[in-house]
Image (tube, grey):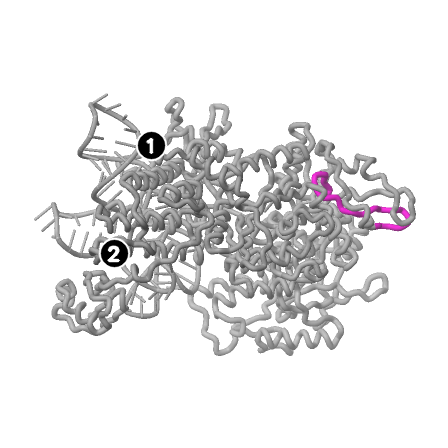
Amino acid sequence: MQERYDHAAVEAQAQDYWNSQRAFAVTEDPSRPKYYCLSMFPYPSGRLHMGHVRNYTIGDVITRFMRMQGRNVLQPMGWDAFGLPAENAAMANRVPPAKWTYDNIAYMKGQLQSLGFALDWDREVATCRPEYYRWNQWFFLRMLEKGVAYKKTGVVNWDPVDQTVLANEQVIDGRGWRTGAPVEKREIPMYYLRITDYSQELLDALEHLPGWPERVRTMQANWIGRSEGVRLGFPYELNGKHELLNVFTTRADTLMGVTFCAVAAEHPLATHAAASDPGLAAFIEECKQGTAMEAELAVMEKKGKPTGLFVTHPLSGEQIPVWVGNYVLMTYGEGAVMGVPGHDERDFEFAKKYGLPITQVIERAAGEAPLAAGQQEKDTEPFTTERWQEWYGAKTGVVCVNSGKYDGLTYPQAVAAIAADLKAKGYGDKQVQWRLRDWGISRQRYWGCPVPLIHCPQCGDVPVPDKDLPVVLPEGLVPDGSGNPLAKTPSFYEVKCPQCGADARRETDTMDTFVDSSWYFLRYACADDSAAMVDQRVDYWAPVDQYIGGIEHAILHLLYSRFWTRVMRDLGLVKVAEPFENLLTQGMVLNDIYSRKGTDGRVQYFNPVDVVVQSDAKGARTGSVLKADGTPVEWEGMRTMSKSKNNGVDPQKLVTEYGADSIRLFMMFKAPPEDTLEWSDDGVEGAARFMRKLWRVVYEYVAEGHRPSATGQNEQTVGEPTDAQRAMRRAAHQTLAKVTDDLGRRRVFNTAIAAVMELMNTLGKFEDRSAQGRAIVQETLELVVQMLAPIVPHACHALWHELGYADALIDRRWPQPDPEALIQDSIEIVLQVNGKLRGRVVVPASADKSQIEAAALADVHVQKWIEGKPVRKVIVVPGKLVNVVV
RNA sequence: GCCCCUGUGGCGAAAUUGGUAGACGCGUCGCACUCAAAAUGCGAAAUCCUAACGGAUGUGUUGGUUCGAGUCCGACCAGGGGCACCA
């Protein structure tokens, strides 16, 4: 055995072995239980970043652990290869997005291989390949036939100078990123998928996903946003015709408090009024400025203008003024809202600003506790649902007032009565409303999957016949930032109508890249099938048993995938509805940011590897200076790694310097998988130190000659073990039990590694060199190497051989703790007096409650603290502690 | 603005079901080995008071439930993720 741990040689040798054995290529084997472990596929941006390394290390640990559990494990990899960054790179470098993308894929694939991930590369997919995206197109046409896909207009960000649709990301402070021109909202025709048809099912099924984090399920449920309310119309007359201004409200009980209605700028009523009111027309134009981003709309100043039109209150008959409000969105609900400033925060603000009347129609019910002194002051604020709950704890604590016949009714009573009256008059009824909107998939961009439609002047929108699929995206174009290159490429868009043969124009929009990622996990099962989107192999592998990816995908990607899988189910393509059985959302990777403001006022960022941190006698950070010249730089805290902050870490450099195993160990040890991970070079150094120590301990043991395993059947030196020997074996098997639980059930890896480190420390103090003692060292080292195998597979592969085994560690079954070794005959009990720790006592493991209590009360420390005082109560938690209350 | 999450020594964290707060590691300090350095090994350390024994305090702030709260409940503060065309 080599004395020195040579990570480069060890890793090359292990990887060569796995490759030569094709160890991670899997086939469908109905006789064995399958396990599908999937990490979110990367966007091929150039090189792997640390977030990728973390993501794929977690997946690899689970993959290797489940393999040792005897499962037939599939861990595939692919490329989410369409998207905006390729177009940006193309513009910057004057190369087609395709070349850039394929080059990146080649480089990043090499990086993944150097990290030793147990991937089945035979199943690799890249979404920009026609073999893949033809099935996007094929399936889109099926959805069109079924009515799941349809056409309507949608709002986009429009750059008036470049005459281009902008992604939200390309809008900086309300202006186009390249032109600086103020962005406008514009309505254009687009294709949508009816995800809202699945709202109820997508919501209900969240209840049956115990393998998903609670917070992700909550976020999805809120996103789908089911609310029960009332849809009602305010009647009005226009050009002699009777119309209804429809609104939806969850607060029908406040209907008698309506003092105005507000409509979106694009609402027909607004358009009508603007025709005769230039001031209003100008305001409506102003509303069209700005972006379509919700976050920005939510924080902008609420503005409005009266239309001069009135509608009739459906119950009171009062005349209600109609306003145009910039906070009312045409795309939400009805594009109109009723204003109840007495009981809604936003309406209150609006009414205050424009001097509209504020009417209170909800009051504390008789018999409810009066408000506390501090709360009375808030009476000047609107009496919102949140306030009810804050003040009274429940909606039923308040009743209607100033509401005529509805006075005295509670919330549910009032809603029921008002809904019934509206229904009788034909003005409305109860209705379930969803926050979820249909999924617009049209993108006016080049580097994506072409939408397979042909626009014919005679026949309208004609689907591309299946036999003509795929509609191949030309790969040689270079975008210039103004509009979609496809729309400037006649060889692409000039086609004959498949129905009538006339000259027609091919659709030049491409699909949202979320389409690509909504079913790639199913394609891995049958990536080589050129005849069908999926085949029966999917039934073996689906659903994914463990999905791992960033928390930032908690809503959109995961919801779209759940929807898409259901549509495939409804078309008979798959048998499952839920694509991902278990979900692990990994936290982000952060690094220090160092900067300095130059004399010209520009901020310069320095990579943390070029900075030395200064500290005081306790190790607390006091400052930081540049390695190069010793000049001070400012520490700005920690953020996600990014080019702009110059705080990225290159995985390749680290693999060369420390080896893949040390990087993997550090990543898994530093933080639990769901938390953010703070990068530290010292931490990597520490991981490398542990690897060297592990190697050295095995080396020193092996150098003294082999001994058979104590767990082996042909044990020759069985005698009565010493206390130290029993303690060592117990530590080893306790650690095994904990690590098995951490890796399997809890999916936390940092504590598993800590437990193995602790075991190594214990082993270091076990100096028994007898035959029996050496057998226990052998057994412990075997367990350590097996427990670490999923995390640092290369080194463990080598050490397993050094411990005397000819077989490969990856084919080994996970060891079982020996129940005999776990037996303990005495335990330590913690003694408390009035909840404060005052002592400890060791009792036999067999001691019952009264014996423990007696031992506790007899303890000298306990005696000291209770002396003279009567013992009121003694709480005994068997195996743990005794609390004496005096 | 709305939805979700997080907050524990100098630092990353541990405490799994309400039961010993700080395991494990990084950094720091001390010692050993060395001509020296690196590497390695051993040891110390939450804070305050004390020579020591020991005691008090302590898990963002604040109030509560409990024999007992990092863990449960209320309010607040700070940081992060998402908000539908970044992926």
Amino acid under disc 2: Val
**Which chain hosts label 2?**
A
Name the quarter where the N terminus of chain A is drawn: top left
In the picture of the structure, the residue carrying the numbered disc 1 is A614
Q: Position of residue B7 (x, y in %)?
A: 39, 51
Left or right: where does residue A721 sit relative to residue A171? left
Q: Secondary structure at mark 1?
A: strand
Which sits in the foreground, A96 or A125?
A: A125
Q: Residues within 10 Å of mark 1 (few under 14, many from 20)?
A: few
Dot in front, 2 or 1: 2
Q: Secondary structure at mark 2?
A: loop
Q: Is residue A56 visible?
A: yes
Residue A659 lies in what quarter of the image? top left
Which sits in the foreground, A160 or A339?
A: A160
User: Residue A576: within the magenta?
Assistant: no
Left or right: where does residue A569 sit relative to residue A494? left
User: Residue A457: within the magenta?
Assistant: yes
Left or right: where does residue A540 sit relative to residue A366? right
Q: Position of residue A582 (x, y in %)?
A: 53, 57
Question: Residue at 62% of width from left, 49% of height from top?
Answer: A524
The dot on residue A718 is 2
Name the quarter where the C terminus of chain A is drawn: bottom left
**Which chain hosts label 1?**
A
Question: Residue at 45% of width from left, 34% of height from top?
Answer: A654
What is the magenta segment's predominant secondary structure? loop
Q: Is residue A26 above or below residue A232?
A: above
Which sits in the foreground, A748 or A542?
A: A542
Please state the extent of the stretch shown in magenta in the rendering: A444-462
The dot on residue A565 is none
Mark 2 and mark 1 lie on one chain; the one further toward the N terminus is 1
Q: Position of residue A751 (x, y in %)?
A: 38, 51
Question: Residue at 43% of width from left, 57% of height from top?
Answer: A746
